[in-house]
Every structure is written in C-alpha cells, then in structure tokens.
Image: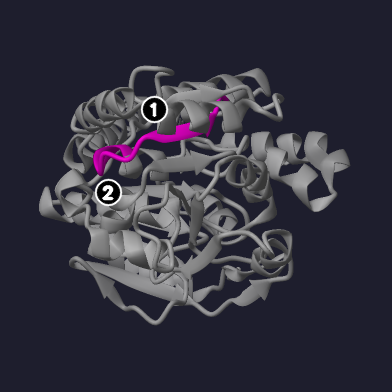
Amino acid sequence: MRIALFTETFLPKVDGIVTRLSHTVDHLQRMGDQVLVISPDGGLNEYRGAKIYGIPGFPLPLYPELKLALPRPAIRQELAAFQPDLIHIVNPAVLGLGGLYYAKSLDVPLVASYHTHLPKYLEHYGLGMLEGVMWELLKAVHNQAQLNLCTSTAMQEALTSHGIERVEVWQKGVDTELFHPSLASREVRSHLSQGHPDSPILLYVGRLSAEKEIDRIKPVLEAIPDARLALVGDGPYRADLEKHFAGTATHFVGYLTGRDLAAAFASADAFIFPSRTETLGLVLLEAMAAGCPVIAANAGGIPDIVTDGVNGYLFDPTDEQGATTATQRLLANPQERDTLRQNARQEAERWGWAAATRQLQGFYHAVLERSLLSAA
C-alpha cells in the first residue's frame, strides 16, 4: 500500500501522538508499505525510509510548540507523484482539512484518527462554552472519512455518542525493548531528585500544559515527607507551574528521550498522572513497561490501560484526596508495589508496536476493499 499521512504534528516534536506516528511509519515501511508524511516543517526530509514533505507553519498562540501549517497547492503535486492508495488524516484541524480535500478531489479513500480530546481541552483554556461547537466541527470532518480510528473504548463511546460514525479502536502500542525495568539506577534517581536518591521519587512525564492538570500533584507531594517530584517535559504552562510548585521539592527536568527517558521511568517510585482529558495516555504504558507503578485519574482512556489494584491505582478525579491516598498506600507497601510493577510489565508486554501496526494495516485493507466494491 501507498499511504499519505497528513498530521498536524510530527518529529522532531515530542509527544504521545508523535510517538505513535513515528513507530507506525517505521513498522509500515518495514512491512513493505510506502508512506508519505505531510506535516508542519520540522527540518526533516525523511524518516525510516518514508519521505516527509514539510509545510512552513506558524506557532499556535495558545501553544507555541505547535505549528499551524496551511494547505498549499504544491501538496497536490506531491500526491500526484506519490500516487497514494489511501489518505490518513491525523487529528484533522488545518493541514488535515487539506488531506480531506485532496482525498475527495483525487477520489482516494480516507481514514481519519482522533488522538486529542479537543472538546475537553477547551475548558482548561477558558473556552468551555465552545464545546458544543467543537463537537459539531469534529462530526462534520470525521463523518466524511470511510473509517474513524480512536485509541480507547472510552473515546469510541464519546465519539459515537456525539454522532461520529464508523469508529473503531486502534490498539495501543509500546516499545517494550526500550522501556524496561532493568534500566533502573541510583544515578538516575539522584538526577531526578537533585541529589536525594533515597527519597521517594514521584514522576510525571508529558506536556506541561493546562489540560494535564499537573498542579493537582502538589498536595500529593506536600502530604508525603521527604518525597521529591520530577516533572519531565516542557510546554506552555511551565512558567505557571514553576510558580505553583515554588518552595517544594520539585525538579523541572525538561525533555528526556530514548534510553534516558526509559531510565527515568524505571528509576522512579511512582508515576503520577492526574489528567482527565486523555484519549489513551500512551505515556502510562511506557511507565508500565519500565516497571514504574502508575497512579492515574479514572477518566478518559486510562482505564483501558490501568486496572485498579492489579497493575496500578486509579483514583476518582473528583476526589481531592484520591491521588494522595493512592500514593501513600503505594509507598507504604513495598510488597504490593513490587506486585504492581510485575503486573504492569506483563500488561505492557501484550502491546507491541508491530501488532498495533498490523491491526492498522487490516483497517486500511478493509477500507480499500469496500472502496473497490462500491466502485464496481
């Protein structure tokens, strides 16, 4: 197959969507397919054998790390040269609308995927009154696709209940070779804790943005004597968070990637994830693969990954003490913590990227077959 992938974000940006897409492109190419990535320009022309066609963009005002790239006529020439069998638009917003247009005008089957729970994000930016409008816009775009993919059963139910049709779950994936418990080290613990490796280390990894609700970790940190918090990542909310956590034992680590990131997961005592807006929470699966016990909000797609009391702890996101109680319980019971670590690793081992990509190929083939039948 020849797949043209339109995405609003790609390498070198670091986030869960890019992680999924980069592994997907890698495995599709390995499996004999050809991929053309059309994305905002990040300075790359190729990735794992796939051509990247970068479109100059400008920073999003509310989120400068994200670039908005407007569709341009030259995209048609790229597509004409590539001759895609199928177009896949990821989180269609601006550039993705160009993918939709070209799928229609070139009569190429269209797949769309939903990775960011935008309607729920709005309330964190003071725009909650627009949630209904956002759902109508999403429905208008996604219902033009032959298939819509999302990343959890919770998101499948949310999309379907708001009138989006033909929704299937694209299974989760994680690199179980990179993320591994064997990478735990005292040296990494010392780095994360700024020289206090014997203290309980709480870890957060992800975007530092309002919708992640990272500020809700502060009471957890304050309730546990000697605990240290490491925030790995960056984003538009960092300055606010630095003020919020001022005077606490919090280390803003910045971005970590590859083996350094995997070692951070493996070396921490608990991974705290308070977000209520996750479509999946891929970072949770990375933590679990590294054997880091997870404490997360029982919301969105998270229960698809974490089974409370089995491979992590879930807390009621409306309970202000929920995360604190769960963390105290985890740290007070070393034997139970070890059991959670082992079960988390076993769960992660079920979800390799190769299997997730084979499932995606199955979706693509089904769309192509239906398209051929309807044309006959």
Q: Quadrant of residue 355?
A: top left
Question: Which label is found at residue 305?
Answer: 1
Q: Amino acid at mark 2?
A: Ala
Residue 105 point in image, percent of width and height: 51, 53
Q: Amino acid at mark 1?
A: Ile
Whether 254 is among the magenta residues is no
Residue 79 point in image, percent of width and height: 37, 64
- Mark in the foreground, 1 or 2: 2
- Position of 86 with respect to 223 (left or right) is left
Q: Magenta stretch: give its range.
A: 288-298
Q: Is 173 in front, or is 24?
A: 173
The 10 Å Cα crowd at callout 2, few under 14, some 14 to 19, many 20 or more, is many
Identified at 67% across, 59% down, the residue is: 245
- Position of 314 with respect to 200 (left or right) is right
Callout 2: helix, strand or loop? Answer: helix
- Location of residue 245 with respect to 363 vertically, above or below: below
In three-dimensional space, the C-alpha distance between marks 1 and 2, rounded to whole angstroms, equals 18 Å
Callout 1: helix, strand or loop? Answer: loop
